[in-house]
Amino acid sequence: MRDRCAQSSSTAGGTTPEINQAGGINGRPIKLFLEDTQFKPDVAQRKAVKYILDEGVKIIIGTTGTHVAKALMQVADKNKVVLALYTAEGDEITGEEFTPYLFRAANNASMHAAATTYAFRDKPYRKFYLLNMDYAFGHAVAKAYKKSLDRFKPGWELAGEEFHPLATKDFAPYIQKIKASGAEVVLTGNFSSDVTLLIKQAAQFGLKVPFGHFFLSDPVYMREVGDAAIGHITSYYYMLGIDTPQNKAFIDRWNKKFKDTDNPWPEVLIGGAYNTTMFLAAALKQANSDVPDAVIRSWEGLAYDGLSGRQVMRACDHQIQTPIAVATIVPGPGKFYPFAYTGPVTLVPAETVSVPPRETGNKRCQ
């Protein structure tokens, strides 16, 4: 019997040869099935169930989107298979909607907001404007930013708060409100076109205040927005510039293998997926089994030297405790890309960004 994993993105596909060339896990090779969720919960569920029933898959690795992750949590719980997340940040996933078959090896929204806000702790700004997408994740981000501002910026002022429709094309009305508010910083969790258009239009309309972001370490975004993001701050649990021996070695291996492809460097989701898969592999090795109940017992409380340093899978809610990288966007060319990109990376300690389980509604941890 092979250890089998179904995966919703190809970003961690490079780990399988690395694991198998080293003898697999407990002497058994990994078999990996790659699928695209299309960012749709029903598609993710249908494909996951197919592999569970037809191929005997016992582990699912993914996936982008809290709504997609929640759909896969239902599949994992019903079919008693392990679901390992390397993204999807809604606090409730390891909080009030916890299932023992789910492990998140990525930061949640509150940890992410804490890291971004922490970067402003010693800066003189007091007036913050919150601009986020008008759906569950955007509202969760706004709530998380307020909590972390209370913690790291006592006496801060809310200059304004707005939620805009997904896929907004014209940010001019929001930018004018921000300018009129006297805000000194804009905090957002926007992604996809909602972050690239916001940054470009903010620059076009002369909004000259720093932004705190979640996802600007993604070179796809930075290639598009260019110099308009210089001076903005971003955070994530994986970044190219993390200065650990593990990450330096990983980057070197990746570039040697993929330097002539569209991904010569392991950008944010690639690094996150790799880290998650290798952490899972450590749990499988310790369990000496791919039986889900054994994997669960093994992974709970397990410590791992990952790409960002020492990481621990908190036992009661299966939420990774990890340092989070913070960086400011600086002009290009840099070490990795010719365009504006992240500058020197600071790792915010895990204990600084950690969120108590009681704040996410996880009753198992009470």
Image (spheres, rainbow, N blue to C red):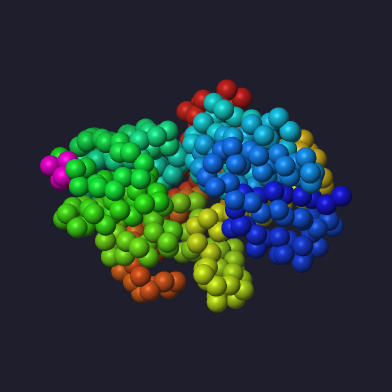
In this rendering, is residue 29 above or below 100?
below
Q: Residue at x 57, y 22 (%)?
A: 363
Pinpoint residue 165: horizontal percent, then vertical percent: 33, 38
Image location (x, y in percent) of residue 341: 37, 65
Position of 242 with respect to 53 (left or right) is: left
Q: Is residue 79 left or right of residue 323?
A: right
In this picture, residue 257 sits left or right of residue 107? right
Work out whether residue 212 can be spotted. Answer: yes
Q: Nearer the viewer, residue 304 or 77?
A: 77
Extent of the magenta region: 176-180
Taking the image as shown, residue 41 lies to the left or right of residue 302, namely left
Q: Position of residue 360 (x, y in %)?
A: 49, 29
The residue at 72%/55% (across/down) is 32
Rendering quarter of residue 289: top right
Q: Characterize the magenta stretch by its predominant secondary structure.
A: helix
Extreme residue in the right direction: 1
Residue 199 image-quadrant placement? bottom left
- In the rendered view, would you say 353 is above or below 324? above
Say which of 181 and 226 sits in front. 226
Image quarter of the C terminus: top right
Give me the residue at 59% from left, 63% from top: 246
**Which residue, as the protein is rendered here, is positioned at the far left?**
180
Image position, residue 232 (x, y; %): 30, 56
Q: At 30% from the left edge and 53% from the top edge, which residue is drawn?
A: 197
Residue 169 covered by magenta stretch: no
Whether residue 184 can be seen here? no
